Amino acid sequence: MNKTAIIFGATGLIGGELVKKLLEDNRYNKVILIQRRSLGLNHDKLEEKLIDFNNLEKETESLRGDEIFCCLGTTIKKAGSEEAFEKIDLELPERIAKITVRNKIDKILVISSVGSNFHTSNFYLKTKALMENAVGKQLVDTIIFFRPSLLLGNRKEFRFGELLGRIFFPIFHVFLWGKWKKYRAIKAKVVASAMQNVANSSFEGLHYIESDVIKVLGKENNEK
């Protein structure tokens, strides 16, 4: 198919898995990474564009592709403040969605979070809801939000919450059924597989995909 994929957030847990999957996917002849620092990977299909995100719009004027994958995400602790967190998890995805429109790219796939909610007192989940609203207003043909639950995978940095999740997940997993099923922990590589599969499916328009559905959509590549 000779497609070109553009990935923001390739240094993250999901983004890193997605890079590996798309480089192995014969439907793509180019995978462009937009980031601050190099991953240090060598592949014929890989192109890294190292930029200053303060000048994001100017440095992406010539950016062209078939779909944009926005895998950006951090924590308030890592960002350093709520304001810094908003710049990464709210403002950047909105700016990327506007670039998607400006550059006439038809599809954007965005990582959000299970529990995203305008009315919650949880700052993290409210910010995710605001991000979905801001991105969803952009005039892109297809916008797909993925709402994964607790992510399982090997991060480079330590996150205490995820450590607890790995310990207690096997215990509480069996009790999460019905409307609670979407809160089951999920492997980052399954989320990446779901993004890959959905990008190459008949999905059109605006969609919000919850974590339990992500697991179904991502298991095609032998992920369980």
Image (cartoon, rainbow, N blue to C red):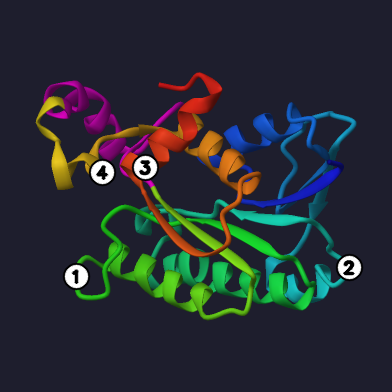
- Highlighted range, magenta: 148-173
Q: Is residue 157 visible?
A: no
Numbered disc 1: secondary structure: loop
Q: Residue furthest left?
A: 175
| Label 2 close to label 1 by CB (< 8 Å) | no
Q: Which residue is mark 3?
A: 213
Q: Which residue is mark 2?
A: 62
* Real-space CA distance between mark 1 and mark 4, rounded to the nearest whole angstrom: 18 Å
Are there few (<14), some (14-19), or many (20+) residues within 10 Å of tag 3? Answer: some
Are there few (<14), some (14-19), or many (20+) residues within 10 Å of tag 2? Answer: few
Quick check: 81 left or right of 217?
A: left
**Type of residue at label 3?**
Val
Q: Residue at x 71, y 76 (%)?
A: 101
**Type of residue at label 4?**
Lys
Which of discs 2 and 3 lies nearer the camera? The answer is 3
The dot on residue 120 is 1
Q: Residue at x 83, y 63 (%)?
A: 63
Q: Which residue is mark 4?
A: 182
| Label 3 close to label 4 by CB (< 8 Å) | yes
- Looking at marks 1 and 4 on the same chain, the residue that comes earlier in the sequence is marked by 1
**Type of residue at label 2?**
Ser
* Real-space CA distance between mark 1 and mark 3, rounded to the nearest whole angstrom: 23 Å
